[in-house]
Image (cartoon, coloured by chain):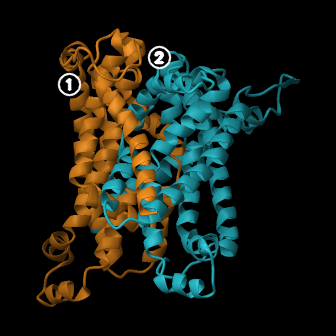
Chain colours: A orange, B cyan
Amino acid sequence: MMVANHCVLIAVSCAFLFPVVYMFFTALQSDNQALTGSLWPNPFMWSNFSTVFHDINVAQYAWNTFLYAGLSTVGVVCSCVPVAYAFARIDWRGRNIVFLLVLSTLMLPNQVTSIPLYILWAKQFHEWTGIQFIGTLKPLIIPSFFGDAFSIFLLRQFFMTIPKELSEAMRVDGANELQILWKVIVPLAKPAIVAVALFNFIYAWNDFYGPLVYLAQSPDSQTLSVALSAFRGIHHVDWNLTMAAALIFMLPVIVIFFLAQRVFIEGITLTGVKG
Amino acid sequence: MLLLLSPWIIGFVAFTMGPMVLSFYYSFTHYDLLTSPHWIGLDNYRFMFGKLTLNGQPNQGDPFFWTSVQNTLWIIVFGVPLRIFFGIITAMLLTRPKRGVNGYRTLFFMPSMAPTVGASLVFVYLFNPATGPINQFLGHIGLNQPLWFFDPTWAKPALLILGLWGIGDAIVLYLAGLLNVPRDLYEAIAIEGANAWQRFRYVTLPMLTPVIFFTLIIGIIDGFQYFDQAYVSSTTASGGVGSPDNSLLFYSVWLYEQAFSYFHMGYASAMAWVMFVATMALTAVLLLTSRRWVHYGGGLS
């Protein structure tokens, strides 16, 4: 019975691994071999990776993607930690209703706000500041400095588990809320903050809709997701190079995931089961 | 307190509430970004549902609106239950072994974090009708070889399989739910002489309903917004948004085309609001029915 169980699980594992393995080996094949559907590269074309970096400017796209993911992660962490603290640790009238409002924005489809936001960045925000937003990463990064519902929710859940006595002791000593947040909550909530940071980094790294809306017309500032989606059409590249570029795109996510898998699994469970 | 909250307050007004109000206003206008919005009342909504009268003549309305609705309902009706079904089965397999569970769980979970664009490209390659490994395998065992992303009847099933590859987040949730079921419930029903199916039907399944309910709601919300995989696979495989033969023209894809290819900002806003209201209504109906079939308790709340 146990053996049969493991056999099924190993078969399922193979099915899950199959696309990644195929992507990896196709990325190492020659142009012609990639059209045969065979698996084992003959010869091994390690030069595909340098071709992708030199000819199709993957380095530029990767840098843009890194900027978007890195800066928006900084923004989300800086803005959501104080907001989550106000929801978790301070009593004020209407707190629960306002928190419900935060949660309700989680249900809001991206598409409802993306059209007016595009118009705001293109027209009003542009006219007020004189800055060109469309075709740059700014409309993708700036909103992250003003809170994100999912991150606020996750941080609040964690902050609530920290014993009240710790902050009360500091309050008696005359510390204000900011000092308590910085000296007590942040050090104890490091695992949750790391989880929020990693979730946001990967979300932004993978994000397609946002970059497509703002960057589709401007080749120099595209992220990997948008550049890759148009790869085969625009650059007339073969499947082996497409797979090599896809691998470069997916590799950081896979590496981060395996290094921090516990953080992700606990984060998913915290939001899904105890929510 | 206000100082701590200020990032969210500014963000909510500038990037959520304000845009929503604007979007509602735009949905009653004709707006192409070049000239100012022009008030046309309910005409966008009439055009959407095919009840528009233009210059005294009945107008057919949007020819692709109902196509996109049908495609979206298809992917929800087949995709969401399939995810729940395979998610629970895989999670149950994971509760049995004493060793290696974490390894399997990590492996199954990983694809759900992978970028959708990358995954879609890989699957378009795997499903290539002539040279892709999937059809080569089907040929070897003497089965029919569908044209997948090149055939209107097989394009959506290919997307379902792509969706199953990213099922890992649901597996993790179901596994956590299964491990939360109190042991004594199984012992109690075993004393009554229940068989394996009865244990599943009367203990496991009821105890899992909160997680099933959560994944059902998320599945429906995500289903209405289904975009990345459809957009990438249709443009990469057979060369046009929504192709072949509009079989991958999902609601969000058509909305995106209206807004950012044709710059029909008013009409696209109306489509977005219809989608928003439909999502809310479905969620509300599910919440109301949930009292009948979702069992809270036993450590899950």
Q: Which one is nearer the viewer's eye here, B189 or A257?
A: B189
Say which amino acid is labelled 1. Ala
Q: Which mark is residue A59?
A: 1
Mark 2, mark 1: which one is toward the viewer?
2
Q: Which one is nearer the viewer's eye here, B14 or A65?
A: A65
Question: Disc 1 sits on a residue from what chain?
Answer: A
Q: Which residue is mark 2?
A: B131
Q: What is the CA distance from the residue labelled 2 to the residue labelled 1? A: 30 Å
Residue B103's image quarter? bottom left
Q: Which one is nearer the viewer's eye here, B212 or B58?
A: B212
The correct choice, above or below, for B216 with respect to B180 in the image is above
Q: Which mark is residue B23?
A: none
Query: Which residue shows up at 17% across the image and 77% down it?
Result: A180
Asked if marks 2 and 1 touch (Cβ < 8 Å), the reply is no
Where is residue A191 shown, x and y percent of the image? Answer: 22, 65
Where is residue B147 shown, x and y percent of the image? Answer: 60, 21
Residue A149's image quarter? bottom left
Q: Is residue A24 left or right of residue A153?
A: left
Secondary structure beneath label 2 = loop
Query: Which residue shows up at 26% across the image and 66% down it?
Result: A82
Callout 1 crowding tier (Cα within 10 Å): few <14, some 14–19, many ≥20: some
